[in-house]
Amino acid sequence: MTKAFRLWFRRILIPLFMNDLYTDVKVMEDMFRASELDWTIARPSYLNDGPARGDIRISGGSNPRGGWKLSRNDLAVFVAAQLNSEEWSRRLPTLAE
């Protein structure tokens, strides 16, 4: 994803067409943060139907550098692994290939 596209996406597309969605997501995340639950909110980048590659890059904030897609299979592997792990407990990992 080019720098120009990211800028266009964040400065034009989100405010004009997706502001309600992002507002709802923030409310949901705030509710989880305020709870006593053991939660992990995985933030996958653009999902595709490709096979699991096993080389997921994970960041605790924005998309991992250069990453902009992730297979649904790799996301499923990550989510299943979190059932027995506390590595990302009460955190919001962003995942990409």
Image (cartoon, rainbow, N blue to C red):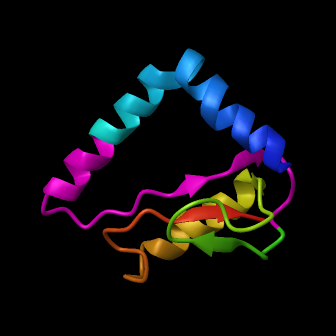
Residue at the spot 65% in from the left edge and 25% down from the top edge: 12
Q: Position of residue 26 (x, y in %)?
A: 34, 40
* Camera-side residue of 9 and 36: 9
**The magenta segment:** 28-52
Would residue 65 appear left or right of 2 to someone viewing this image? left
Q: Is residue 32 magenta?
A: yes
Q: Position of residue 19 (x, y in %)?
A: 47, 23
Residue at the spot 58% in from the left edge and 27% down from the top edge: 14
In the rendered image, the residue lying farthest to the top is 16
The relative height of residue 73 versus residue 23 in the rendered view (above or below) is: below
The relative height of residue 77 versus residue 18 in the rendered view (above or below) is: below
Residue at the spot 78% in from the left edge and 76% down from the top edge: 55
The relative height of residue 57 versus residue 8 in the rendered view (above or below) is: below
* Camera-side residue of 48 and 80: 48
Quarter of the picture containing the C terminus is: bottom right
Q: How many marks?
A: 0
Q: Position of residue 74 (x, y in %)?
A: 71, 63
Would residue 85 appear left or right of 33 to someone viewing this image? right
Instruction: Tell me if residue 1 can be seen.
Output: no
Instruction: Tell me if residue 86 can be seen.
Output: yes
Q: Position of residue 27 (x, y in %)?
A: 28, 37
Q: Is residue 18 magenta?
A: no
Would residue 12 appear left or right of 38 to someone viewing this image? right
Residue at the spot 59% in from the left edge and 69% down from the top edge: 78
